[in-house]
Image (cartoon, helix red, strand yellow):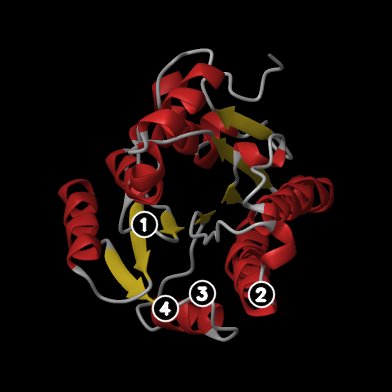
């Protein structure tokens, strides 16, 4: 019976920023458990094609949409692309994000606004657009991919960390309001993952040693480490989890 609760057959999942890294692993994981998946990239690319091919191994009906979330109209356009194919997502995973590594007092206004648009505003808009369908069905899953920086903000990523904290607050706020409608809202919160985004920083041996020493497991996470938690939160196996932040950080947030 428990195995059946993880079955996502018949559900449509939309995973933003799923051409690479954590988003790609989550999209593949949801597809493996039966969901039809809409993968997303800023623009057409080989990594996006590869991510779609991986999802289609499990779920042949999966397809891709493209759009730059730094544009205010991108969310409406992405939903229009899905609706043209008759799709309303039952599961929304807001994984796409952007970060700028700049001292807080030097961050240009444009960079601040871009990070808040991609990381928070777009999430809010997606939840708004997905909600009516989920409410009508009495079933839905809204998931943000947050960051351990909600608890341990990096000194060079003040706006990024703040945007992730805003997402976490939104999760708690909406969970209190809509969980009774069969819609769960949760925050999947990664620590340090060995992804393309972190490749350059972790390639610095001095910095890498400092980071590794701060992680109790003394290992970096791999993208697939997030997929299992995403499947739990997206499925009926996680139906009683809402308003939660689940950290996948190897213990990084623990006090030293």
Q: In this view, does 36 lie to the left or right of 99?
A: left
Disc 3 to disc 4: CB gap under 8 Å? yes
* Residue in the picture at 83% in, 52% down: 177
Return the disc, 3 or 2, that comes first in the chain's sequence. Answer: 3
- Residue occupied by mark 3: 69
Q: Closer to the observer: label 3 or label 2?
A: 2
- Numbered circle sitting on residue 225: none
How far apart are labels 2 and 1 at the CA level?
28 Å
Please give left or right for residue 177 compared with residue 233 in the image: right
Kindly report the distance in space between the C-alpha atoms of the residues bearing marks 3 and 2: 19 Å
The percent coordinates of residue 230 (x first, y second) are 48, 38
Residue position marked by numbered label 1 in the rendering: 18
Q: In which quarter of the image is the C terminus?
A: top right
Q: Quadrant of residue 249?
A: top right
How far apart in space, not on screen, are marks 1 and 4 (Cα)?
12 Å
SS assignment at label 3? loop
Please say if 97 is above or below 185.
below
Residue under circle 2?
108
Q: How far apart are marks 2 and 4 (CA)?
A: 24 Å
Q: How far across and how far down the image is residue 36, in percent?
A: 33, 55
Q: Report whether residue 205 is seen.
A: yes
Q: Mark 2, residues whose alpha carbon is within 10 Å: few (<14), some, or many (≥20)?
A: few
Could you tell me if the residues under marks 2 and 1 are in contact, i.e. CB atoms within 8 Å? no
């Amino acid at each position: 019976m428990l195995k059946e609760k993880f079955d996502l057959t018949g559900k449509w999942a939309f995973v933003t920023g799923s051409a690479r890294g954590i988003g790609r692993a989550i999209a593949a994981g949801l597809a493996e458990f039966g969901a039809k998946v809409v993968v997303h990239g800023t623009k057409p690319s080989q990594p996006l094609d590869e991510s779609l091919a991986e999802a289609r191994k499990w779920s042949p009906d999966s397809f891709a949409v493209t759009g730059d979330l730094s544009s205010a109209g991108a969310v409406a356009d992405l939903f229009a692309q899905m609706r043209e194919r008759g799709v309303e997502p039952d599961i929304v995973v807001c994984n796409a994000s952007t970060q700028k590594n700049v001292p807080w007092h030097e961050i240009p206004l444009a960079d601040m606004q871009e990070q808040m648009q991609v990381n928070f505003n777009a999430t809010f808009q997606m939840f708004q657009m997905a909600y009516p369908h989920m409410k009508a069905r009495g079933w839905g899953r809204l998931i943000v991919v947050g960051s351990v920086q909600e608890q341990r903000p990096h000194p060079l990523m003040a706006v990024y960390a703040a945007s992730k904290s805003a997402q976490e607050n939104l999760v708690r706020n909406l969970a209190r309001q809509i969980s009774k409608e069969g819609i769960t809202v949760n925050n999947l919160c990664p620590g340090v993952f060995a992804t393309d985004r972190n490749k350059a920083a972790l390639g610095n041996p001095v910095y890498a040693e400092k980071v590794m020493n701060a992680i109790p497991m003394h290992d970096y996470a791999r993208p697939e480490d997030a997929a299992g938690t995403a499947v739990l939160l997206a499925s009926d196996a996680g139906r009683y989890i809402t308003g939660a932040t689940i950290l996948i950080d190897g213990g990084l947030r623990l006090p030293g």
